[in-house]
C-alpha cells in the first residue's frame, strides 16, 4: 500500500497526525533570568517560544524517537537574550540532535561538572548534544530563531535541576554583541 505521509514538515512547522503544540510564556520562566524584576514586569501570558512536536509513540517508550521544531521570539529580558528553559534529560544518558533552520542563536551546553560552552546556531548548523548534558538555546538575532530537534522517546525532561541551580553561563548583550558570562560554576 502506498499512502501519503501522515505529517508535513514545512520549513519551521509540523502539521498532521500525532503532532502537539506547546507554548512557553513569561510566567513559565520564573526565576530563570538574571534580571527577575525585568521578567516579572512583563505580561505573564506573553509567549516567548513555542514547539511543534511529532510524538508517534507514548512518552517513555523505549526505542522510539521524537521530532520537534522550536521557534524562539527575538528580544531580551534585561540584558539577556530570550532563551528556552533548558534541561537535562530525565534519563540522563540520552543524547539529542539540534539543527538550525532560520535566524541566529547560540546553544548552551553544560555537563554535570557544570562546565559550560556555547555553539553558534544558524541555518544549516548541526549540533550533537551528548548524554548527561543540559541544553538551552538563546535567540541572539533580531528575527525568530527556529531549530529542529530529534531525541529518544524515553529521554524525558528534568527541568527541576535547572530551576534549582541554573546554567553556569549566561548569554547577555554587551556592546551590541552576545557574550557568554560565567555564573555559579
Ligand atoms: C527535547 C528538546 C527540545 C526542547 C525545546 C524547548 O528534548 O530538547 O525539543 O524541549 O526546544 O526547550 P525546553 O524543553 O528546554 O523548554
Ligand atoms: Zn532535550
Image (spheres, helix red, strand yellow):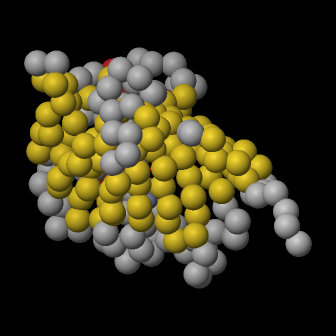
- Identify whether 31 is placed above or below 17: above
- Identify whether 179 is placed above or below 97: above
Q: Quadrant of ligand 2?
A: bottom left
Q: Going 51% across and 19% down the picture, which residue do you hit?
A: 43
- Could you tell me residue 107's position as x and y percent? 30, 47
Relative to the observer, which residue lies in front, 170 or 43?
Answer: 170
- Could you tell me residue 106's position as x and y percent? 28, 41
Q: Going 42% across and 74% down the picture, which residue do you hit?
A: 94
Horizontal side of 29 relative to 172 (left or right) equals: right
Q: From this viewpoint, is residue 91 visible?
A: yes
- Could you tell me residue 23's position as x and y percent? 59, 38
- All told, the count of numbered labels is 0
**Which residue of the protein is positioned furthest toward the front in this rendering?**
2
Q: Quadrant of residue 85?
A: top left
Relative to the observer, which residue lies in front, 140 or 60?
Answer: 140
Q: Going 58% across and 63% down the picture, which residue do you hit?
A: 66
**Which residue of the protein is positioned furthest toward the bottom in this rendering?**
62
Horizontal side of 131 relative to 175 (left or right) equals: right
Q: Quadrant of residue 18?
A: bottom right
Q: From this viewpoint, is residue 22 visible?
A: no
Relative to the observer, which residue lies in front, 151 or 40?
Answer: 151
Amino acid at each position: 500500500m502506498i499512502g501519503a505521509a501522515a505529517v508535513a514538515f514545512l520549513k519551521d512547522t509540523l502539521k498532521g497526525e500525532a503532532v502537539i503544540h506547546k507554548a512557553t510564556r513569561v510566567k513559565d520562566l520564573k526565576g530563570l533570568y538574571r534580571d527577575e524584576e525585568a521578567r516579572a514586569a512583563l505580561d505573564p501570558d506573553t509567549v516567548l517560544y513555542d514547539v511543534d512536536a511529532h510524538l508517534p509513540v507514548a512518552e517513555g517508550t523505549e526505542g522510539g524517537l521524537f521530532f520537534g521544531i522550536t521557534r524562539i521570539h527575538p528580544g531580551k529580558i534585561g540584558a539577556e537574550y530570550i532563551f528556552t528553559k533548558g534541561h537535562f534529560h530525565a534519563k540522563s544518558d540520552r543524547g539529542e540532535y539540534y539543527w538550525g533552520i532560520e535566524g541566529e542563536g547560540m546553544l548552551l551546553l553544560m555537563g554535570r561538572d557544570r562546565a559550560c560552552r556555547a555553539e553558534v546556531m544558524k541555518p544549516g548548523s548541526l549540533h550533537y548534544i551528548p548524554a548527561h548534558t543540559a541544553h538551552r538555546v538563546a535567540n541572539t538575532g533580531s528575527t525568530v530563531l527556529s531549530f529542529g530537534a530529534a531525541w529518544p522517546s524515553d529521554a524525558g525532561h528534568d527541568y527541576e535541576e535547572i530551576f534549582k541551580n541554573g546554567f553556569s553561563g549566561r548569554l547577555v548583550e554587551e556592546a551590541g554583541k552576545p557574550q557568554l558570562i560565567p555564573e555559579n560554576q
